[in-house]
Image (tube, rainbow, N blue to C red):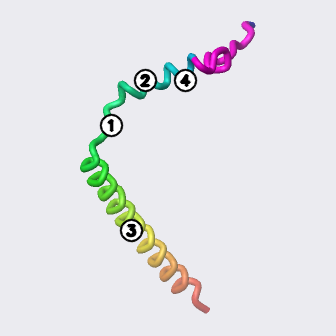
Amino acid sequence: MEKPTMPAFTANPLQFIKEVQQELKKVTWPTRQETIKLTGVVIIISLIVAFFIGGLDAGVLKLTSTLYKR
């Protein structure tokens, strides 16, 4: 069995940070307008899912309270 090797960033932390900076320069960052638009989409979808799950919860509560009514 081979001995496990240490991750590269533990051998030379400065080299690791330099490589991270180089990779971050390659990233295509969204514009401010894209960020605002996508944030709105996330909020709207989250609200839709919340109302859907809340509706299911209310429905199941009503059903179970009706079935188990004494």
In primary-sequence order, the first of circles 1 and 2 is 2
Q: Quadrant of the N terminus?
A: top right
In primary-sequence order, the first of circles 3 and 4 is 4
Q: In the rendering, at what x and y percent does residue 49 appear?
A: 39, 63
Q: In the rendering, at what x and y percent does residue 2 appear?
A: 72, 7
Kindly identify the amino acid type of the residue bearing the numbered disc 3: Phe
Q: Which residue is mark 1?
A: 29
Q: Which residue range is magenta in the image? A: 2-14
Q: Which residue is mark 3?
A: 52
The answer to whether 31 is drawn above or below residue 9 in the figure is: below
In this view, the residue in front, 25 or 63, is 25
The residues bearing labels 3 and 4 have C-alpha atoms spaced at a distance of 44 Å
- Circle number at residue 48: none
Tell me, yes or no, whether the highlighted magenta stretch contains residue 5.
yes
The answer to whether 42 is drawn above or below residue 4 in the figure is: below
Q: Residue at x 39, y 71 (%)?
A: 51
Q: Crowdedness of circle 2 by 10 Å Cα count: few (<14), some, many (20+)?
A: few
The answer to whether 21 is drawn above or below residue 33 in the figure is: above
Q: Which residue is mark 2?
A: 23
Element type at mark 4: helix
Res 30 quadrant in image: top left
The residues bearing labels 4 and 1 have C-alpha atoms spaced at a distance of 20 Å
The residues bearing labels 1 and 2 have C-alpha atoms spaced at a distance of 12 Å
Kindly identify the amino acid type of the residue bearing the numbered disc 1: Trp
Q: Residue at x 51, y 79 (%)?
A: 61
Kindly identify the amino acid type of the residue bearing the numbered disc 4: Ile
The residues bearing labels 2 and 4 have C-alpha atoms spaced at a distance of 10 Å
